[in-house]
Image: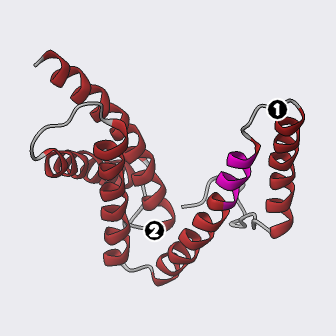
Amino acid sequence: MDAPGDDGRTADLTWENVGLAFSFIAFNAVVSRVFQLGVGTSLVTAAVRCVVQLTLVSLVLQKVFEAKNPWAVAGIAFLLNLMGTIETVVNKAKRRFQHMFPSVLFGMLCSTIPISMIGIRYAMAVDPFWKPEQYIPVVGMLCGATISGIVVACNYVLKEL
């Protein structure tokens, strides 16, 4: 369902756009070197890594969007939850407990999947709810919010125990 006034066109990201964005990063790296802040190299490395990762992800998502297969969309939704679980358990949680990984994965899946299905189908009135161009970004946003909630909850409860 298109928004009112939406002609269905999307803006394409070109290499010129990427180059323009990278010029700002390069500028910051030069400023870092001039003022001896020491963040220029890591900034450029992170930017290049980001471009490579997003290029690879875009190639995968392009195939999923073209296929319009509910199983492919479910696979990406599971992958997002799995990556969110890894981020939560490995990088964000200050304290851990036995069987934390399956518990967090279960909590992520049980919160993001039903909410995304209900929200896409009824709040956004999309039928079928699993249209990849709408479902995948919503699941990604829910995963991001869920990671924050789980980290805060786990850290608080484990600190109190």
> Viewer-nearest of labels 2 and 1?
1
Disc 2, SS: helix
Q: Is residue 140 above or below residue 73?
A: above
Q: Say which quarter of the image contains residue 121.
A: bottom left
Residue at 82% in and 36% down: 32
Q: Say which quarter of the image contains residue 5.
A: bottom right
Mark 2 or mark 1: whose residue is earlier in sequence: 1
Residue at 30% in and 35% down: 93
Residue at 27% in and 54% down: 113
Q: Quadrant of the N terminus?
A: bottom right
| Magenta stretch secondary structure, dominant | helix
Q: Is residue 132 above or below residue 93?
A: below
Residue type for callout 2: Pro
Q: Look at mark 1 in the image and give the residue it sits on.
A: 36
Dots 2, 1 in contact, CB < 8 A = no
Residue 94 is inside the magenta segment: no
Q: Say which quarter of the image contains residue 62.
A: bottom right
Q: Position of residue 79 (x, y in %)?
A: 34, 64
